[in-house]
Image (cartoon, grey):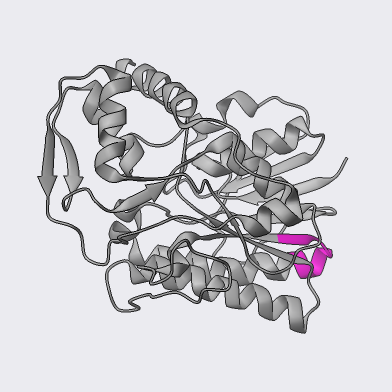
Amino acid sequence: MPRALITGGAGFLGSHLCELFLDRGHEVICMDNLITGSTANIQHLFGRNGFTFVKYDVTNFVHCEGPLDYVLHFASPASPIDYLEKPIQTLKVGSLGTHKTLGLAKDKKARYLLASTSEVYGDPLVHPQKEDYWGNVNPVGPRGVYDEAKRFAEAMTMAYHRFHHVDTRIVRIFNTYGERMRVNDGRVVPAFISQALRNEPMTVFGDGSQTRSFCYVSDLVEGIYRLLMSNETTPVNIGNPSEMTVLQFAEEIKRLTGTKAPIEFRPLPEDDPKIRRPDITKAKKLLGWEPKVPLEVGLQRTIDYFRKVLLD
């Protein structure tokens, strides 16, 4: 039974990864300090054969008994609210956490996968974003703590790959949505859905003309798994290239929830990207991957989940 350590495993993406790995016959060690993750996300995995949860902060020395085949580093605050409230922790987990987990992978001779982000492209001057684009990031702006932590993490990962010959992978994750997102994490999907279900004004920043592309979580984790099992050591975009404006997205949530909530416009946050859409040519060619779940289907599942959470 192959053995995987997943940091940030009690988070939104991490919990879905833990589930996928267990379903595919892996032993999973889920590690999380729970500053943004929650054991509620992995409650259904407790008691499953091969699943272990360890509460731990990976910015400290990471020790793991026994052999490891894979290390997946997903620990990090990942929403604007989280990294603006926890800027130092965000920088530390991207730098120290990446260093410690790479050291563990080196020691165990394990394959390593870094969860990077489309935010490494900043407010892009190239559209759609391809992996060879170096980005347009403000290092001293409020979002810089997340963007630069991930850019540093990529550089550290490639240094361990080149210098220590660690077998590494880097996934650049674009906007993802689905069950187990936190209601109050500040991202557009949970914000719009929770506001719509409560019949509160749906807050659109700027004039709503900025674009996003949304990938359902089951598609995303499938792409990550395929990347891990591939031979590709340079960054790969995983996301949905189907692009829409934030205002169009708000109208879609209104339609699916049947809410009468009005749309309310607010000032655009500093350094908020105007456009965001992955070029997934590389993922299609190398991994045979592309998203399968239609937006309406994924959103309906997500809305049903939020309805339960808000009613409880």
Residue 221, given in percent of the width and then of the height, sits at: 63, 42
Residue 244, given in percent of the width and then of the height, sits at: 36, 44
Magenta segment range?
105-112
At 42% from the left edge and 36% from the top edge, which residue is drawn? 181
Relative to residue 31, is residue 65 drawn left or right? right
Identify the residue at the far right of this view: 1
Residue 57, given in percent of the width and then of the height, sits at: 53, 57
At 45% from the left edge and 42% from the top edge, which residue is drawn? 214
Q: From what the image shows, is residue 151 above or below residue 272?
A: below
Q: Is residue 117 magenta?
A: no
Relative to residue 181, is residue 170 drawn left or right? right
At 31% from the left edge and 29% from the top edge, which residue is drawn? 252
Q: Nearer the viewer, residue 208 or 11?
A: 208
At 84% from the left edge and 53% from the top edge, which residue is drawn? 66
Relative to residue 132, is residue 104 drawn left or right? right
Q: Quadrant of the C terminus?
A: top left
Residue 245, given in percent of the width and then of the height, sits at: 30, 46
**Can residue 91 be seen in the rendering of this structure?**
no
